Image (spheres, grey):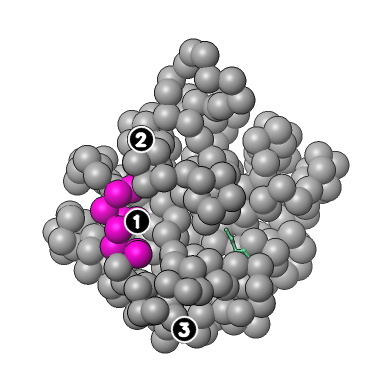
Amino acid sequence: MREYLIAGNWKMNLGRTESVYLARELADKIPANDAVETVLIPTFVHLDAVHQAIASSALKLGAQDVYYEKKGAFTGEISPAMLKEVGVQFVLVGHSERRHILGETDALLNQKTRAAIAEGLSVVLCVGETLPERQSHQTNEVVARQLAGGLAKVDSDMVQLRRLVIAYEPVWAIGTGLTATPQQAQAVHSFIRQRLTDLYGTSLARTIRIQYGGSVRKANAADLLAEADIDGLLVGGASLAADEFADIVRAAEQVKGKK
Ligand code: 13P
């Protein structure tokens, strides 16, 4: 079955010393286990230092963004190969803060997704509706559009080897303390699984992990993960505290043991 994926997206929150300290603490607190894959996602400039800090641990490294070109005159951008060089295995693509603050479009995210997968990285494609979209019953429509746009020309071969993860992050739940209820999240996750089934067939769609993100805490982690189609968590604020994040990983191990 699907191994859980618990990822801590540190966003633009920590300096270098804090990042290395947190990474070392987490490396000590989170032992390897078969049920949960754990990923730390610091800012670009701290990837190298965090990679060294977690080198002899079970933790993996992710980046918050990626560009789709291999090299050239793209000031400020970073290629998939450059990320791999510093030990990155996962990249977030289309986080709502990049869609809404930086104006990234589905067409751009599709190019990033394809380039990163082609380089052998695992892509965490983020989707999710805003509050007005939910209130006007457009959640499924928005998520379907983001999936279709982000996954255009991403074929079954590219999705093999766990190269694709979807993160459902309702924008209204990010950093607000408002979490989707497990039932609300499961309804959208099940809809996403259906779209993945339409695209890739049942057996491949079953292997694709769908994370939930948005005000995840240790207090709500187990209830969310107990749902059938919730295969992991993308954690923002609560990933900045070592004990809280390690407890979320522990909760995931315990739920997996019962599921
Ligand atoms: P919070 O957990 O702070 O709500 O952030 C969620 C998120 O955006 C993770 O990518």
Look at label 1 and name its amino acid.
Gln
Looking at the image, tell me whether mark 1 or mark 2 is earlier in sequence order: 2
Looking at the image, tell me whether mark 1 or mark 3 is earlier in sequence order: 1
Which residue is rendered at x = 56% and y = 44% of the image? 102
Q: Quadrant of the C terminus?
A: bottom left
Indicate whether 73 appears above or below 178.
Answer: above
Mark 2 burial class by Cα count in 10 Å: few <14, some 14-19, many 20+: many
**Relative image position of residue 136 (x, y in whole percent):** 39, 79
Between the residue at mark 1 and the residue at mark 2, the CA separation in whole angstroms equals 13 Å
Q: Give the main secondary structure of the magenta stretch.
A: helix
Q: Secondary structure at mark 1?
A: helix
Q: Tell me the residue that label 3 is attached to.
A: 182
- Mark 2 or 3, closer to the camera: 2
| Segment tinted magenta in the rendering | 142-150
Q: Tell me the residue that label 2 is attached to.
A: 111
Residue 112 included in the magenta stretch of the image:
no
Look at label 3 and name its amino acid.
Pro
Q: Is residue 65 left or right of residue 248?
A: left
Look at label 2 and name its amino acid.
Gln
Mark 1 burial class by Cα count in 10 Å: few <14, some 14-19, many 20+: many
Q: Is residue 59 visible?
A: no
**Relative image position of residue 123 (x, y in whole percent):** 42, 45
Between the residue at mark 2 and the residue at mark 3, the CA separation in whole angstroms equals 32 Å
Whether label 1 lies within 8 Å of ligand 1 gets the answer no
Res 146 label:
1
**Relative image position of residue 130 (x, y in whole percent):** 49, 68
Give whichever of 23, 164 is nearer the camera. 164
Looking at the image, tell me whether mark 2 or mark 3 is earlier in sequence order: 2
